[in-house]
């Protein structure tokens, strides 16, 4: 039965990786894979009660991640509805390409650490559409936005879904992950940024009519945008603090933040027409969030949970240790692999491979995995959610990115890897 479950997982994994060629949404593939793995495990087991107990334990862990993501996505969508992010992006006005590139990259880096890399990439590409009419120049900026968003998301527990998974799972702690991954993440962005600073040629192009706003909001200001921006960002930053103070799961803190924003959104324009108010309420934001992504996480985490319960991942980890030997090489390869396949199942599988009893919180494996899985996806444009979003928005060709961005993204990735390993050796 183990062989059948592994085959189903591999086929499901391939279907997820080849989502666009086979024209089947990865959420459908993930859900089928997760359900089939547990079904076959249950049918082959002699103790159905034990299987049910294991499924309940995994579902409890999975639910904490899903509710966290639901809360975070709704908060970000709510701030976006009030044009909160435009308060940051509208202040970037420089016409110097190099200066603009540095500004865009640093804003992306820190914004991604607070929000998430996907949302940040969408906001920043919307910005450069307004500032850079020249398509060729804008594509280089878009490539750097992917790198900066992924690098920025890796070093905080709320910036990238893979780091969030490790944080919620108890593999990394808030202060430590920020402390050890900040410098590697900065270098991951800085190396490609320095290269483009000296090699990028051309101008931003002729600016469009100032009345034309490509951000999609128009110039009419929405009441309460400042309040919602500060409350939204404050709610996200407060989550790790809430966990430290109360020792409750992170999703409780995220739902607390969502509840506060929900109340405030209802109190802004309380007498306005219900139809006009709806887009600016949490109920409206919930309808706009990417629910299929939440179900994708459910499916893939269920599948990985089945492999973990059947001890398949434990045996695979032992095989890797005997075959490759070096844990740093294994994690580095996982990061490179995340450029080809989705990093969520890679990290979920790694969490199942290595036992917390043997590799406790803030162990080398978890810290290095957070960096590698978070930033390795930048090497190919299909390797991260931010990359896929930018690819769709700017119609960036896979080959164009491979020729012009992939190599410098890989140099940045290895620079960060080297920095982390050097810092780890010095500290230990």
Image: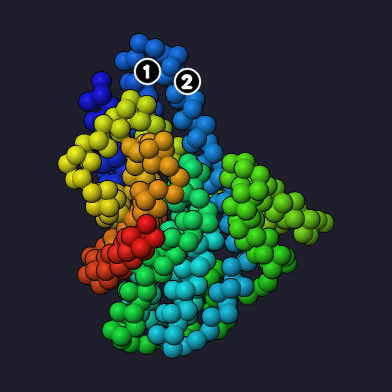
Say which residue label 1 marks.
Answer: 42
- Quadrant (top left, top right, bottom left, bottom right) of the N terminus: top left
Q: Is residue 351 above or below residue 53?
A: below
Tag nearer the camera, 2 or 1? 2
| Disc 1, SS | helix
| Disc 2, SS | helix
**Residue 111 seen anywhere in this rendered image of the structure:** yes
Q: Which mark is residue 53?
A: 2
The residue shown at (27%, 48%) is: 327
Q: Is residue 12 above or below residue 393?
A: above
The crowd level at tag 2 (other Cα within 10 Å; few <14, some 14-19, many 20+) is few
54, 357: nearer the viewer: 357
Residue 179 image point, x, y percent: 48, 61
Residue 370 image point, x, y percent: 40, 53
Q: Which mark is residue 257?
A: none
Residue 165 image point, x, y percent: 46, 45
Left or right? Give the position of 256 relative to 129: right
Q: Is residue 31 above or below residue 424?
A: above
């Amino acid at each position: 039965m183990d062989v059948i479950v592994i085959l189903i997982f591999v086929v499901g994994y391939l279907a997820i990786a080849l989502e666009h060629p086979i024209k089947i949404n990865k959420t459908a593939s993930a859900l089928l894979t997760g359900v089939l793995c547990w079904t076959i495990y249950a049918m082959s087991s002699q103790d159905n009660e034990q299987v049910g107990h294991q499924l309940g334990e995994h579902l409890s862990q999975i639910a904490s991640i899903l509710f966290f993501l639901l809360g975070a996505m709704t908060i970000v969508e709510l701030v976006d509805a009030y044009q909160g992010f435009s308060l940051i992006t509208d202040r970037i006005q420089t016409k110097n390409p190099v200066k603009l590139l540095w500004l865009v990259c640093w804003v992306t880096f820190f914004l991604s650490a607070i929000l998430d890399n996907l949302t940040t990439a969408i906001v920043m590409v919307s910005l450069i559409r307004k500032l850079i009419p020249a398509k060729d120049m804008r594509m280089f900026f878009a490539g750097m936005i992917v790198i900066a968003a992924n690098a920025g998301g890796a070093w905080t527990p709320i910036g990238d879904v893979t780091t969030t998974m490790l944080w919620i799972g108890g593999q990394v702690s808030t202060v430590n992950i920020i402390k050890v991954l900040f410098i590697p993440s900065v270098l991951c962005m800085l190396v490609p940024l320095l290269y483009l600073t000296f090699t990028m040629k051309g101008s931003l192009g002729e600016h469009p009519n100032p009345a034309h706003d490509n951000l999609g909001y128009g110039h009419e200001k929405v009441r309460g945008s400042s309040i919602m921006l500060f409350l939204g960002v404050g709610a996200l930053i407060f989550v790790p603090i809430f966990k430290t103070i109360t020792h409750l799961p992170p999703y409780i803190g995220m739902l607390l933040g969502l509840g506060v924003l929900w109340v405030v959104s209802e109190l802004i324009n309380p007498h306005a027409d219900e139809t006009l108010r709806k887009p600016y309420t949490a109920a409206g934001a919930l309808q706009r969030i990417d629910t299929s992504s939440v179900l994708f996480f459910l499916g893939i985490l269920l599948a990985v949970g089945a492999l973990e319960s059947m001890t398949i991942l434990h045996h695979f980890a032992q095989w890797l240790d005997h075959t490759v030997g070096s844990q740093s090489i294994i994690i580095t390869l996982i990061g490179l692999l995340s450029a080809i396949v989705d990093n969520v199942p890679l990290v979920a599988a790694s969490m199942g491979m290595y036992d917390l009893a043997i590799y406790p919180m803030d162990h080398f494996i978890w810290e290095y995995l957070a960096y590698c899985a978070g930033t390795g996806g930048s090497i190919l444009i299909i390797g991260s959610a931010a990359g896929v979003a930018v690819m769709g928005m700017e119609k960036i060709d896979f080959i164009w990115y491979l020729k012009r961005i992939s190599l410098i993204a890989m140099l940045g990735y290895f620079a960060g890897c080297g920095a982390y390993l050097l810092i780890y050796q010095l500290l230990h």
